[in-house]
Amino acid sequence: MKSLILALLALTLTIAGCTSTSTKKGFVPRETYINPGDAFPIQTLQSISGETISLDNNKKKLVILFSTWCSDSQLVFREVLASPLAQDKNLQIIGISRKEEIKEIIKFKKKYKVNFDLVADRDGAIYNQFANTGVPRLLLLNENNQLNKAIIGESPGTLKKVFW
């Protein structure tokens, strides 16, 4: 009986993904606060190594809002790193970790052999500009830093949706 309860709990957590969409009052719908065509409001960020990251106006961008502990975020990173996107010289990829400390992000970067910049959004202020709940979120920006598409990446095959 105990193993059945644990299995049901694991299944529930897997289905729920890496989001908290309920409150004491009930279900909270996922919202995205940036729409296709909107300008990305951030021009520079600070990487976990302390370097300034400028959003290059001559490249497309893939901004990944994630959490290191989230299995869906981990899957998206594995997919991105195994894809041609990770080597595309005309694409700037930036990962923004929500509400985590730099030491955890550094461990994640080493474990997954991440070859692009990661940013610590310790208080969630960056994430809160774009969404109310749910990671990973992929924001596809064009060369002019306008949103082309926002994707919630909570299932295998998320990269099939990544095109500009």
Image (cartoon, rainbow, N blue to C red):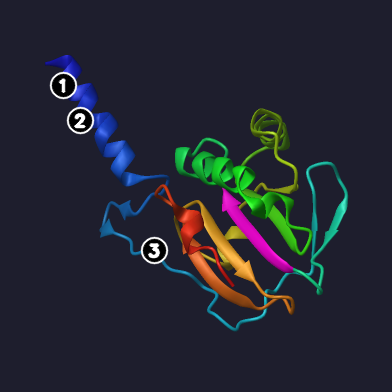
Residue 153 visible in this rendered orientation of the protein: no
Q: CA distance from mark 1 to mark 2?
A: 6 Å
**Percent x, y for residue 130?**
56, 67
**Percent x, y for residue 47?**
80, 48
Crowding around mark 2 (Cα neighbors within 10 Å: few <14, some 14 to 19, many 20+) is few
Amino acid type, label 3: Arg
**Percent x, y for residue 11?**
25, 34
Amino acid type, label 2: Leu
Does 74 sit above or below residue 110? below
Q: In the picture provided, is 19 more to the left or to the right than 91?
A: left
Amino acid type, label 1: Leu
What segment is highlighted magenta in the picture?
A: 60-66
Q: Is 124 in front, or is 44?
A: 44
Q: Residue at x 33, y 61 (%)?
A: 28
Q: Is 134 in front, or is 91?
A: 91
Q: CA distance from mark 3 to mark 2?
A: 24 Å
**Residue 30 badge:** 3
Crowding around mark 1 (Cα neighbors within 10 Å: few <14, some 14 to 19, many 20+) is few
Choose the circle earlier in sequence order: 1 or 3.
Answer: 1
Does 52 sit above or below residue 3? below
**Percent x, y for residue 104?**
66, 32
**Residue 4 badge:** 1
Q: Quadrant of the N terminus?
A: top left
Magenta includes 62?
yes
**Residue 8 badge:** 2
* Label 1 with label 3: CB-CB less than 8 Å: no
* Label 1 with label 2: CB-CB less than 8 Å: yes
Q: Secondary structure at mark 2?
A: helix
